[in-house]
Every structure is written in structure tokens, then in C-alpha cells.
Image (spheres, rainbow, N blue to C red):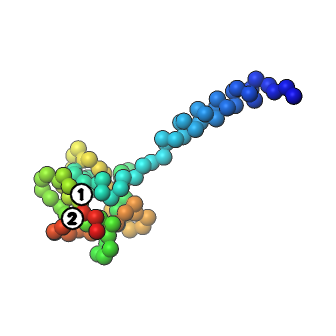
């Protein structure tokens, strides 16, 4: 049985290119332990969406004025953030709780 050039070579080439291009196109949401440092609270186009809760958070967050270099420590800034965070009520990426002591993963 004869196969055409397109079926034998071109279609698999298009399929391979499509798989390579689509592989990295999905948005990667950082884990709660990766979100620390300089944080900007935004209304649109966030890197992460969070919901503030009182009980059973995914991450306990402490606001600091400088040196936010550990998990759960956020320095709220207006310029040059490490992450842009939007506070939402529905469909968050993870939940947070504001704390004064012992920030980090519960």
C-alpha cells in the first residue's frame, strides 16, 4: 500500500512541533511555600490568587517591614515585587491566614 509523503513525514512533524509548543504554555502556579519576599497586592493580572481565612490555612503569613526571606514572610510593596497577589473570595490557588508569630506552612 502506498503512503503519501504528507502522511509519512509532514503530519508527524506537525504533531511533534505542536506537542513541543504546547508543553510549556500552561500557567504554572507557585506552591504556597514558594511565595515569599516582596509581594504586591493587585486587582488584575496576579501571579497567585489567595483567599484569607481564619482557620486551617495552606500558609500562615506574617507581614514584615524588611528581609522577607523565609516561607510565610511577606513584605508588602508597591514597586518591583517578587510576586503579584490578588485576594479573592472564590477559586483561590491557596488560602492564607495573617499571623503575628510562627509564619509558614501549617
Q: Residue 85, percent across and down? A: 31, 55
- Name the residue rendered at 79%, 25% in the picture: 4
State which quarter of the image contains the C terminus.
bottom left
- Identify whether 6 is placed above or below 35: above
Tell me: 81 left or right of 87: left
Q: Which residue is mark 2?
A: 103
Under circle 1, the secondary element is loop
Tell me: 52 left or right of 79: right
Q: Are marks 2 and 1 in contact (CB under 8 Å)?
A: yes
- Identify whether 74 is placed above or below 82: below
Front-most of 50 and 23? 23
Front-most of 1 and 90? 1
Residue 94, picture quadrant: bottom left
- Name the residue rendered at 12%, 56% in the picture: 65
Can residue 85 be seen here? yes
Q: Which residue is mark 1?
A: 71
- Identify whether 28 is placed above or below 54: above
State which quarter of the image contains the N terminus.
top right
Front-most of 56 and 89? 56
- Name the residue rendered at 14%, 51% in the picture: 67
Can residue 76 be seen here? no
Amino acid at each position: 500500500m502506498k503512503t503519501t509523503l504528507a502522511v509519512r513525514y509532514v503530519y508527524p512533524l506537525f504533531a511533534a512541533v505542536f506537542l513541543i509548543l504546547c508543553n510549556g504554555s500552561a500557567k504554572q502556579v507557585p506552591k504556597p511555600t514558594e511565595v515569599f519576599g516582596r509581594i504586591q497586592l493587585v486587582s488584575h493580572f496576579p501571579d497567585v490568587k489567595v483567599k484569607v481565612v481564619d482557620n486551617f490555612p495552606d500558609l500562615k503569613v506574617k507581614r514584615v517591614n524588611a528581609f522577607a526571606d523565609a516561607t510565610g514572610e511577606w513584605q508588602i510593596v508597591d514597586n518591583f515585587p517578587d510576586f503579584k497577589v490578588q485576594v479573592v473570595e472564590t477559586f483561590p490557588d491557596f488560602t492564607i491566614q495573617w499571623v503575628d508569630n510562627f509564619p509558614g506552612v501549617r
